[in-house]
Amino acid sequence: MYKQPILQVHNLNKQYGSGCSACRDTHTRSLEKNYCASCGTVYACQDLSFELYPGEILGIVGESGSGKSTLMQCLYFDEQASSGEMLLNHGDVAGKNLWSLSNQQKRFVRNHILGMVYQNPLRGLKMEFSAIGNIAEKLIAAGGRNVSHMEETGKELLEKVHIPLLRMKEAPKHFSGGMQQRVQIAKALSNYPPILLLDEVTTGLDLSVQASVLDLIKTIQRELGISMIVVSHDLAVIRMLADRTIVMLNGTILEQGLTDQILEDPQEPYTQQLVYSML
Ligand SMILES: Nc1ncnc2c1ncn2[C@@H]1O[C@H](COP(=O)(O)OP(=O)(O)OP(=O)(O)O)[C@@H](O)[C@H]1O
């Protein structure tokens, strides 16, 4: 079904702190969960390697503190990876380690190739701008200057995420949580990026609103055929969305495989617990 990966991550490490003699050497490292008890350095992501294929939804599941958000922030350059390689099979940056690009090149990747939807809409939206103004902001950041084109694109995207056009001039701070997430999704899609990153986008929403946002994500993926990485602590969300799933614990990948396979035949005791608790 899938061909070449559109994105490859090799040996991503992200640590907070400089480490000490007890933890610097990966072979002799002694950690309490993901941190060093001697110096307090946190190893938020440890040697993570995976691929994302065109048109697939890759789910990342794990408990709080397992490193999911740190991973997403490294992918979107909100955080600088400590080491590792991120390779895109797309456009001018194909084959280059994205974490070694200049800031200008990273901005290009953020504006044209990646879209990000955060758990907290305050991170992804300018709450004082109008809904359509938020989309225009992203288009301008990517070099857009044609006002009527921006308005057309904005309307098209807001319609896609079911925001009534009558409300497009309103600021998202007046919207409900579910509507804010839908505007964030529209903004992240501004330049129709081939890859969309979604970090706990339904956490904190009512169950019925959660269901409508998940449904929207599925529909967008089907219609636009873009690749997505979806992070959630909730296996039910991952079950609904993801073709393949990575299970994380203490900054490491515990197991990965087809979502059906992970759900039906989990190999690791931690994953088994996660699956059984959902039944
Ligand atoms: N800026 C930081 N400085 C120090 N430690 C950090 C920082 N950001 C994250 N961490 C630590 O990195 C580890 C992974 O955090 P991360 O937020 O990625 O986990 P998560 O799986 O996304 O959990 P949650 O869903 O609760 O955010 C945690 O131990 C966290 O305390």
Image: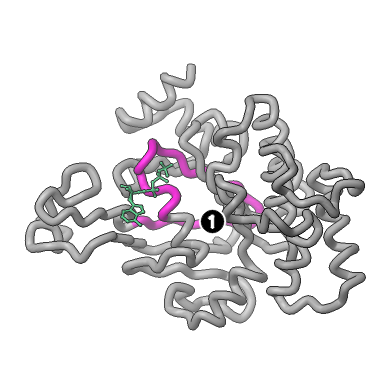
User: In the drawing, does residue 229 fall left or right of residue 83?
Assistant: right
Q: How far across and how far down the image is residue 103, in percent?
A: 51, 80
How are the residues colored?
A: one colour
Residue 13 is situated, as x and y percent measured from the top left of the image, at: 32, 61
Stretch of the chain drawn in magenta = 48-70
Residue drawn at 60 percent across, 37 percent down: 202
Identify which amino acid the numbered label 1 is placed on.
Leu
- At a point 87% along the width and 56% down the height, the residue shown is 155
- Locate residue 242: give its quadrant: top right
Task: Tell me, yes or no, if residue 256 can be seen here.
Answer: yes
Asked which quadrant contains residue 11, the reply is: bottom left
The image shows a total of numbered marks equal to 1
Query: Depth check: 48 or 146 in front?
Result: 146
Placement of 277 over or under 255, stated as above or below: above
Q: Residue furthest top?
A: 279
For mark 1, does the 10 Å Cα neighbourhood hold few (<14), some (14 to 19), or many (20 or more) residues? many
Which residue does the numbered mark 1 point to in the structure image? 52
Identify which residue, 194 or 199, lies in the foreground: 199
91 falls in the magenta region: no
- Using the image as rendered, state which of residue 147 and residue 220 is in the foreground: 147
Pinpoint residue 234: horizontal percent, then vertical percent: 50, 32
| Residue located at (40% from left, 40% from top) | 247
Q: Position of residue 112 (x, y in %)?
A: 67, 70
Does ligand 1 reach within 8 Å of label 1's beta carbon? no
Q: What SS does tag 1 mark? A: strand
Q: Is residue 105 left or right of residue 67?
A: right
Name the residue rendered at 23%, 62% in the picture: 17
Vertical placement of residue 115 versus 160, above or below: below
Q: Is residue 58 visible?
A: no
Which image quadrant is residue 111 in?
Answer: bottom right
